[in-house]
Amino acid sequence: MLFAPGQEFSLRREKVKGNNCKRGGACRGVKFKAEKNCLVAVLEGDLDLHTVNGIRAQVDAALENTGTRTLLMDLSRVPFMDSSGLGFILGRYRSLREKGGRVILVAPRAQVRRVLALAGVDGIMEICASKAEAYRPGKEGRENGPIE
């Protein structure tokens, strides 16, 4: 199922295998929007051992449903991330890279940015201060060009 650009959506538990969210409701922690040939995932809340399985299931299902190979993860509402969250981000990076895609991280807070820097993620993935920066043509260091 493909979504129109600009359309916001979330996935319900019964449609996401392996999800650990409350039965019947949309999962907390992630909202999606199809924008400029990419999937924007707005993550909200801690990205840790207790939340990452549900978020991973949702993001993977949304990537499969949209067929996109570019994932823009908005981390502006994530106050804390542990190694489980780091593993989640790196897993999406690996799976999309194998398909010729990419992951762009947007607006991580200071604590999250420190975790990303300590793990060396800032050397392999694009990290932008805002969505506008991620969409800007000619951004230096952009491996695959601008998002169109």
Image (cartoon, rainbow, N blue to C red):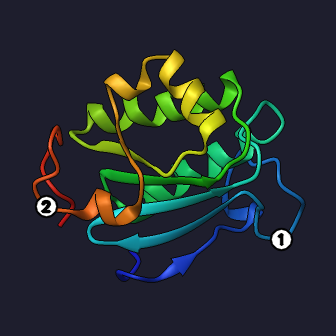
Q: Place residue 94 in its image quadrant.
A: top left
For image coordinates 39% across by 52% down, the residue present is 71
- Count of numbered labels shown in the rendering: 2
Whole-percent x, y for residue 101 in the image? 26, 43
Q: What residue type is labelled 1?
A: Gly
- Residue 72: x, y in percent? 41, 54
- The disc labelled 2 sits on which kind of residue? Pro
* Cα distance between the residues tagged 1 and 2: 38 Å
Most distant residue in the front direction: 110
Q: Which of 148 and 115 is in front in this view?
A: 115
Q: Which mark is residue 125?
A: none
- Contact (Cβ within 8 Å) of mark 1 with mark 2: no
In the rendered image, the vertical position of residue 25 relative to residue 100, given as above or below: below
Q: Quadrant of the N terminus?
A: bottom left
- Tell me what residue is drawn at x 48 percent, y 72 percent: 33
Q: Position of residue 18 (x, y in %)?
A: 72, 44
- Could you tell me if residue 23 is visible in this image? yes
Tell me the quadrant of the picture where the C terminus can be found.
Answer: bottom left
Q: Earlier in the sequence, mark 1 or mark 2?
A: 1
Q: Is residue 130 left or right of residue 54?
A: left
Between 38 and 11, which is closer to the camera in this rendering? 38
| Quarter where residue 122 is shown | top left
The residue shown at (51%, 16%) is: 119
In this rendering, position of residue 107 left or right of residue 95: right
**Label annotation for residue 25:** 1
Q: How crowded is mark 2: few (under 14 residues within 10 Å), some or many (20 or more)?
A: few
Q: What element carries label 2?
A: loop
Element under label 1? loop
Residue beneath disc 2: 137
